[in-house]
Amino acid sequence: MLIRKAFKYRLMVDEETSRRLRMIAGCCRFVWNRALTLQNERFAAGEKRLGYVRLCRELTVWKQQPETAFLREAPIHALQHVLKDLDRAYCDIFSRRAGPPNFKKKGQHDSFRNPDAFTVDSTNGRVKLPKLGWLRYRNSRKIEGLPKNVTVSLHAGHWYVSIQTEQEVPEPVHPSLTCIGIDRGINALAALSDGTLVKPLNAFARAKRKLARLQRQLSRKVKFSQNWKKCKARITKLHSRIANMRTDYLHKLTTMISKSHAVVVIEDLQIKNMSASAKGSLESPGRNVKQKAGLNSSILDQGWGEFGRRLEYKLRWLGGQFLKVPPQYTSQTCNVCGHMSAYNRDSIKFKCRSCGHEAHADVNAAKNILAAGLAVIACGEHPVAGLMKQEPTGGEYAFA
């Protein structure tokens, strides 16, 4: 089994090295934008787009021109990899996996990648990059596997190095034999079918007032002035702290769940649609826009998508199984008698109108999700359509 992992560390660089890193990132951004402009011009003229090899020839010409001679100061491997990424972006368009590529901006796309010609010294916590030499990083954990490429990026005023590795390991066998169903929510980030309720971190909600105050201060300053840049840096730092808190919390939670259970079942939620704006347009304005905006903010603050993604790959590494089931009627169905009704659930309480069973609504939904996952394992399909046609029977799961 081939496992790919990325080990990210913070670089310890001085002002001169930081300036050189910014220069290389700027050259990569320039090459991307110029190559994208060239492709757009050829498309407008009805000509065929250039492939990766032809773009590399254009890059050689650009380096020889006096007005773009600064490209010689950047490593050729990083510049060529930018062209390879652009060529892959166009291939994704034709395979309908992504939209057209966009131009890159300074302050948002400050990174570059070296696919080869680098050396990693994990014992001493340093990495050697072309035209930069040895750079030290904070060696917080041991690197596992064979390093394949190195990505250097700027975030919130600090430079980071991400080392991607490949490692061939035997097919793992999960040490646990238990199964669990998980219902994601707002009041409880995760409700487990065994009755456990995981409280949400609400990292953004905690810092919302401070962030609003800093944004008001930024609006009163002259744009691009020194005080404006300082305030902008404080806002960026606060956003980075919010993201780091959420990332740390989700990693700890998903690691604990994936190590404790061999089979994990969650709902296949369309998070993008659930968090879409209800503002509408001038012709057809939306309803309850303020309430929907608050709900969208809470959904995105929980990190539902990252929660499911991390559970999936961690279970795969440990030899477990990860399943997604349709979310229809899981919160309206009694997990004891199988009775389905929209009146069964009242906020966070669940009370069956048929058998009188009472439970926490999210825990009841998690049990239905687990039953649906077990039905998928047993039957190979999800019998949700039959739930609407058949009368519920007592003593059985609704999806079994």
Image (cartoon, grey):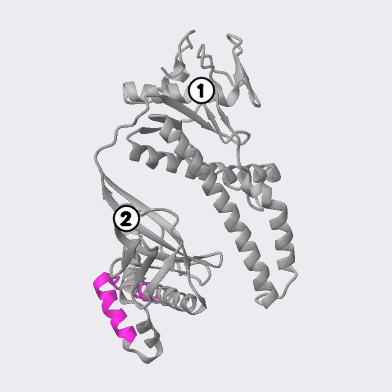
Q: Which mark is residue 170?
A: none
Please provide percent x and percent y for residue 182.
Answer: 49, 30
Q: Which residue in the structure is indicated by mark 1? A: 194
Q: Looking at the rendering, in which quadrant would you find the N terminus?
A: top left
- Residue projecting furthest to the bottom: 66
Magenta stretch: includes residue 144: no
Provide the major secondary structure of the magenta segment.
helix
Q: Nearer the viewer, residue 327 or 189?
A: 189
Q: Which residue in the structure is indicated by mark 2? A: 165
Give SS at disc 1. loop
Drawn side of residue 88 relative to residue 355, left or right:
left
Q: Residues within 10 Å of mark 2 (few under 14, many from 20)?
A: some
Residue drawn 34% across the image and 40% down it: 317
Q: Residues within 10 Å of mark 1 (few under 14, many from 20)?
A: some
Q: Amino acid at mark 2?
A: Thr
- Is 273 drawn above or below residue 41 in the view shown? above
Please provide percent x and percent y for residue 138.
Answer: 46, 61
Magenta stretch: includes residue 46: yes
Drawn side of residue 244 relative to residue 386, left or right:
right
Which segment did they paint magenta?
Answer: 37-63
Residue drawn 32% across the image and 35% down it: 319
Please provide percent x and percent y for residue 31.
Answer: 38, 76
Give SS at disc 2. strand
- Is 98 drawn above or below residue 234 in the view shown? above
Could you tell which of marks 2 and 1 lies nearer the N-terminus? 2
Q: Looking at the rendering, in which quadrant would you find the C terminus?
A: top left
Drawn side of residue 220 relative to residue 94, left or right:
right
| Mark toward the viewer: 2 or 1 | 2
**Separation of marks 2 and 1 at Cα, in angstroms:** 37 Å
Please provide percent x and percent y for residue 380.
Answer: 32, 25
Q: Are marks 2 and 1 in contact (CB under 8 Å)?
A: no
Q: Nearer the viewer, residue 366 or 279?
A: 366
